[in-house]
Amino acid sequence: MTKTKQAPAAALATSLLALAACSSAPTQFYTLLPPAQQQQAAAASFQIEVQPVDLPPQVSTPELVVRTGSGEMVPVDSRRWIAPLGSELRDALSANLSNRLGAHDVYGLPNSMAPKGQGPMTWRISVKVQRFESALGAYARIDALWSLRRVGDNPIAVTCSSSVSETVLPGYPALVEGHQRAVADLAAQIAAGLGAAQQGGAPLCPAAG
């Protein structure tokens, strides 16, 4: 009888130890910001103002959210973004665009004190992410609507859509690197939209493909 009573207790202790070991697993933190790199483009004649990014609520969490099936999304508690995902996306887009265009991002800075009609032109960039999808060992995907609007009395605006996807190797670091590349792809399309504006014209949606 004594052995019968001790067996469940031993099993319970083993389970508690296993749970404690799981709960003590270190949390890994990730960023979408690319490594620091030299500026690719000559200094632009305009500024950019990258607005906060609008995210779907399904992925607006501290944890990485991974798709594991046709309808299953799993937040991974031990794998987290170093900052809110919306902030990570805004900052990563800003870094990529500034590098590609040679333009300063003036978001959050006080309005210029230069007289009206003087000083560099500013293009306001707004991004609404419709899908931010992560599949381990498969792909990292971002679908987004984005707009370019010239700040001023007579703004010129254009609204475009982009869908970018990067194939990734197994593992969370590879998945995050895939999203870094996807953000860079999105920034490249936005920069292409501003290409005509660099020559003083209106922005255009880049051709698909």
Image: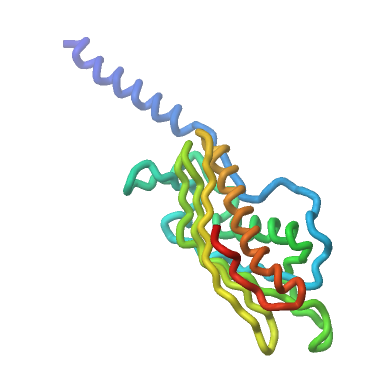
Residue at the outermost left position? 1
Residue 97 in view (yes/no): yes
Q: In this view, does 99 lie to the left or right of 173?
A: right
Which residue sits at x=62%, y=72%? 204
Q: 66 or 167, which is in the foreground?
A: 167
Q: 2 or 57, which is in the foreground?
A: 57
Residue 121: % across, % down: 76, 78
Q: 202 or 129, which is in the foreground?
A: 202
Above or below residue 97? Residue 77 is: above
Which residue sits at x=46%, y=54%? 59
Above or below residue 18? Residue 150 is: below
The colour style of the image is rainbow
Q: Is residue 102 left or right of residue 150?
A: right
Residue 156: % across, % down: 64, 82
Q: Is residue 93 left or right of residue 101?
A: left
- Work out which quarter of the rendered image holds the C terminus and state it: bottom right
Residue 51: % across, % down: 62, 69
Residue 200: % across, % down: 75, 77
Residue 107 in view (yes/no): no
Which residue sits at x=50%, y=51%? 141
Which residue sits at x=45%, y=47%? 65
The number of discs equals 0
- Work out which quarter of the rendered image holds the N terminus and state it: top left
Above or below residue 91? Residue 147 is: below
